Amino acid sequence: MIRITNLKKQLSDGFCLDIPSLVIESGERVALVGVNGSGKSTLLRLIAGVLKPDSGSIEIDVPKEEICYQPQTPFCFSGTVRSNVALSCKDEALCDRLLRECRLTELSKQKVGALSGGERQRMALARSLARQSRILLLDEPLSASDLEMGDALSEVIKHEYDSPEITLLVATHLPKHAFLTATKILLLNAGRIEEYNDPQAMKTPDSTFGKAFFAQWVWG
Amino acid sequence: METLKEAFSLIVHLDSELIQIICTTLVMSFFSTSISALIGIPLGVSLGKHRFPGRGALLRVTNTLMGLPPVLAGLVVFILFRSIGPFGSFHLMFSVPVMVIAQVLLITPVVTGLSASASASTWVAMRETALGLRLSGLKQTSLLLRECRGPFLSVILMGFGRSIAEVGAVSLVGGNIQFKTRVMTTAILLEANKGDFSKALALGIILMLLALIVNIPAYTLQERWK
């Protein structure tokens, strides 16, 4: 479970994230949505611990080692696709399975420098999934994928994290993938929570901003 | 043309003095660059990766020392190692080891400063991924070193270049003694002072050839790492 209380974080550009209260239960798959600069990445970075809050608290009921975070622009370490995924793999079989599921088997011996943007993103996703952490935080993991690949990877994420003991938070701009992956949708606007509900309920949001925001979505 | 002929003749006829000069130059440059790299790269990586109180001041001191005049470095080592100096009992004056010490003093800040700069920019790029994957501190550092191996090789080559081409400090503490502490640069200076510019230039060409021989495999290695 992730419990956020009176969380505030001001960034150097003046943006301020302000979350008075938020509880994410274990086993939830939460899609973080909102326009650019609404605070999705900042919230993920704060939960991951790579950013320190100005005030407030984030209580997480799992050890820090059990939280895996993939930034919006993941770094690809020199070497092959396989050596990158193996960085966080406990065994060879898991590495092989994730390479296969993320459609990277044929690229496994390829040097990362030769990969396209989408392939690098798939490799980063396989590497994060290989960590098998109890909380996984993904920042725009499918932004460079085409629709068909995005659907397939959404299914992989959903399949890997379909357990009451593990929690997934995904920041995304893709409504279809949010709907496919999530059990809850968290809508952020200018650093504040506008809506937090299940996908069905989000089709008829309460707030004016929510209505305007989701009106643009073509639901999966 | 005459100069080229003389350089070629010097190489072909390799007399014992030239062999000694080349060997002394290479030994001195190898040790001073290696010691500077062993001190400067870990120090630079620490400055580039970690944030701690006094880091800014350390970086400023390092950057200032990068411009340390060779003669001043030589003078400091001379004062420390002369017979009445604090380290006079080691009897190292006018020997290759004291020339290495002077060059380490000169090159280490350059290696440290450039390593700090290279590792800091790479660490900024990989920090969130490494922390997000919960890699251990040791693993993070080993990956950072691996990612920076190209820039670090350039830094080492630069250090070697500065060492092999340096004249002020080595002439002050080495004394340019024939068959003992004479290196390429001090030999060039001596020939120029004697007015034998052809021989001075010929020695200069050999010096450049030595630098080229060292740079070719290093460049190949860098290309392979890309």
Image (cartoon, coloured by chain):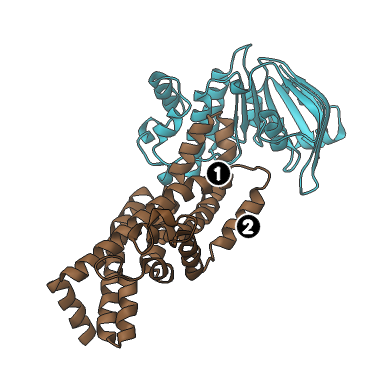
Q: Quadrant of the N terminus of chain A?
A: top right
Query: In the rendered view, would you say B81 is above or below B12?
Result: above
Mark 2 residue element: helix
Q: Residue at x 80, y 36 (%)?
A: A54
Q: How many labels does the image show?
A: 2
Residue type at mark 1: give it: Ser
> Would you say residue B55 is visible in this rendering?
yes
Q: Residue B46 carries which label?
A: 1
Q: Do the residues labelled 2 and 1 touch (CB within 8 Å)?
A: no
Report the chain shown in brown.
B
Foreground residue among B98 and A86: B98
Q: Residue B60 carries which label?
A: 2
Q: How crowded is mark 1: few (under 14 residues within 10 Å), some or many (20 or more)?
A: some
Whichever of callouts 2 and 1 sits on the residue coming sooner in the sequence is 1
Report the chain shown in cyan.
A
User: Could you confirm whether marks 2 and 1 are on the same chain?
Assistant: yes
Question: Which chain does the residue under circle 1 lie in?
Answer: B
Question: Which chain does the residue under circle 2 lie in?
Answer: B
Q: Quadrant of the C terminus of chain A?
A: top right
Residue reaching furthest to the left: B13
Q: Is residue B165 left or right of residue A24?
A: left
Query: In the rendered view, would you say B96 is above or below A39?
Result: below
Residue type at mark 2: give it: Arg
Q: Which residue is drawn at 29% across and 61% down?
A: B26
Q: Distance between the residues labelled 2 and 1?
A: 15 Å
Q: In this view, does B171 lie to the left or right of A47?
A: left
Q: Which mark is residue B84?
A: none
Residue B142 place in picture, x, y as percent: 46, 37
